[in-house]
Amino acid sequence: MQGTARLPAFSMDGDYIIGGVFSIHYYMHTVKHDYTSMPEPLRCTGSMDSRELRFSRAMMFAVEEINNSTELLPGIQLGYEIHDSCASVPVAVHVAFQLSNGLDPVFHTGDDCTPSGRVMAIVGESGSTPSISMSRIIGSFNIPQVSHFATCACLSDKQQYPTFFRTVPSDQFQADALAKLVKHFGWTWIGAVHSDSDYGNNGMASFLEAARKEGICVEYSESFYRTNPRSRIKSVADVIRRSTAMVVVAFVASGDMRILLEELTQEPTPPRQWIGSESWVTDPDMLRFSFCTGAIGFGIQQSVIPGLRDFLLDLSTAEVAASQLLTEFWEGAFKCKLGKSAAKDMRACDGTENIHTLQNPYTDTSQLRITNMVYKAVYAIAHAIHNSLCYKINSKIRCDKFTGLESKQVFAQLKKVNFSQNGYDVSFDENGDPVAVYELVNWQKSETGLIELVTVGHYDASLPVGQEFHINRNLTWVDGGIKVPLSVCTDSCHPGTRKVLQKGKPVCCYDCVPCPEGEISNTTDSPDCFPCPTEFWPNANRDACFLKPVEFLSFSEILGIILAVFSVTGACLAIMTAAVFVRHINTPIVRANNSELSFLLLFSLTLCFLCSLTFIGPPSEWSCMLRHTAFGITFVLCISCVLGKTIVVLMAFKATLPGSNVMKWFGPAQQRMTVVSFTFIQVLICTIWLVLSPPFPIKNLTTYKEKIILECALGSAFGFWGVLGYIGLLAVFCFVLAVLARKLPDNFNEAKLITFSMLIFCAVWMTFIPAYVSSPGKFTVAVEIFAILASSFGLILCIFAPKCFIILFRPEKNTKKYLMNKNQN
């Protein structure tokens, strides 16, 4: 390697050297090259990251602890060479080449190649992008790299980064965990910002994919980097301010996030619920941004490293003055200048500075997270070296430090390490990744008014799906609220509605449309409505199905009661009329009008009235067959009797003509035969109907969508209309004969009464047909009952009412003399 070698920030010689690379400074000093002279050496600039300084010191502590151990690498001294990468790729690459050479001027002073100075493995880097660059270089030399904070999922690709290991979980696990966290709290409309680096770009890509699977929509996704012009940072801040998403997921490196939050403090920013990645959400230095109170995110598990705090605070003035990096830290922390050359605007350090009273990320060991990852990385390398050099003899561990150990041997052993340190397991899978276990942390305001990190839950990727996530205490939300903030593009659609996507917008933006008639949705944000089962109907809110009410003409409702009363009244009226006729059976008016047919007619009318009762009540198989056939047969019997009476009246007048012998053909026997014959035809029609396709009960689900009509299906429509047609044929025939006989002498016949009764009968049944066809549900049955009752009442009132009136109230007319007197009115 040509060029000027970089001096390490910290170094210590040993039998085997472990390299370390940390982003102790935020920036690299950049210069414009004129290509006329050698470029200046790369150097760091900007403020110092105290937490990264703690990481590097933790590595030194772990090496010293191992060197003092009698169980791990006894008799072998490890050394370290720790560099500051300035959080930049060029410096990290420069350091990687320098560590790969193994000829560092700090340790190598002679011409011979001795083991001293050879780097067996490297801890670092903190960022993913520098780690990628380093791994591509040192991987060619089989030098293993164990990162404590490079989380990009891309580094799990062993084809590209074969020697890369890490003690921190991959961002793939964190991205999945963040997506599940957002989904858990019902946030479907979020904003996203990420570092424009391998860490941010790959992490955000993984998160967006996981969010898409969870049904989460992203309003915006902005990227930036700390070295971008301020205009770019301001643009990102303005997007956050203008957005409608309450929740912002930030997959941002700590240094980048600091720049963004500083920009957001310049102008008023609407309250935002921040969801953070491990890089910044657990950084104590970020807690000074109080407007992020309530931020939540995933962090590496807290840990305890005994003795580390004492080591960090054990800094003498001489030790600080001997290190350029510690001098810069000391002067920045205490705002003083070491040495005699104190600046005019800064006081000289007088020795009264007490690091124990210092409050900054370097001294804060209350929540050791990434620091423990550094500690574990050093121990993992030490165990790999131990497994390569050491063996047991008589229960004693012996190590051969003169063995020509190669970095590729350490690499091979790193794949196999499996140990516990301070209660924490350390091992690597086939991709060089550890088991992903996170703590859910929340920024909460303490009683003193300071923002502090509080662990509120856990996430373990090794658990079964659905059981990885657990919250065990209350959270504080944006602005210190206790209620989970709402972050949706559209409010949830309540049950009874469905989502309809808004044209040109993400799937989380939609309108809530009520379910159509007959359909329901019983879940929030239902994408579809679904119909109720056949015998069910939605409630008013259309969020549940209930059984449709069953409807039929019953005895318990007003209409059914009225019709039943008229039916029974008609039957009683027919019986009373028969009783009157029986009581006055020998009177002329009863005998003159064929008393036998009159009693048969009254009997049939009684049956006609009573058969209407079979139409009331729930239909059954027997009632359906009975109601139509009983109605058809009784009415034919009734019309046959009326027809017989009409023929008798007509023939009786003909018989009065000289030489006529016609009455011998229309005697009582013939009248009975006529009635029986006409009725038998109807019985035959009904029998054929019942045998071939009888009526049967059905549930009518089509007339009304919201209720079930219990009714009788006709079975065969030809049978039904055949029965009605035969009744109509007899009625018309009877009506015609009655009309022909209407002008016969009034006192000898009842032709006029029969004419009026048949006129009413025909009128009723002619209007019945269209009314029957068009009436819905139970009203179809009511129309049929009304037709039966109306025609029955028409017959009994027209034929028998005048006779009963004469019998009961005008007995003087009920005499043979009166009936024989043709001139009386």
Image (cartoon, rainbow, N blue to C red):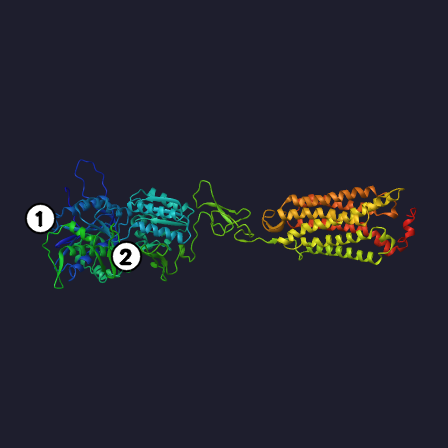
Disc number at residue 369? 2
Query: Helix, strand, or loop for circle 2?
Result: loop
Residues packed near mark 1 inside 10 Å, few (<14), some (14 to 19) or many (20 plus): few
Amino acid type, residue under disc 2 in the picture: Arg
**Where is 808 relative to 93, above or below?**
below
Q: Is residue 527 left or right of residue 76?
A: right
Q: Position of residue 487 (x, y in %)?
A: 43, 50
- View extreme (bottom): residue: 395
**Where is 531 relative to 445, above or below?**
above
- Residue drawn 63% across and 45% down? 716
How far apart, in angstroms, are the residues tagged by discs 1 and 2?
A: 39 Å
Q: Is residue 513 left or right of residue 824?
A: left
Q: Which residue is mark 1?
A: 113
Query: Helix, strand, or loop for circle 1?
Result: loop
Amino acid type, residue under disc 1 in the picture: Cys
Question: Is the N terminus in the top left, top right, bottom left or bottom right quadrant?
Answer: top left
Q: Position of residue 688 (x, y in %)?
A: 65, 46
Residue 334 visible here = no
Q: Position of residue 132 (x, y in %)?
A: 24, 45
Disc number at residue 88? none
Choose between 18 and 451: the one closer to the eye. Answer: 18
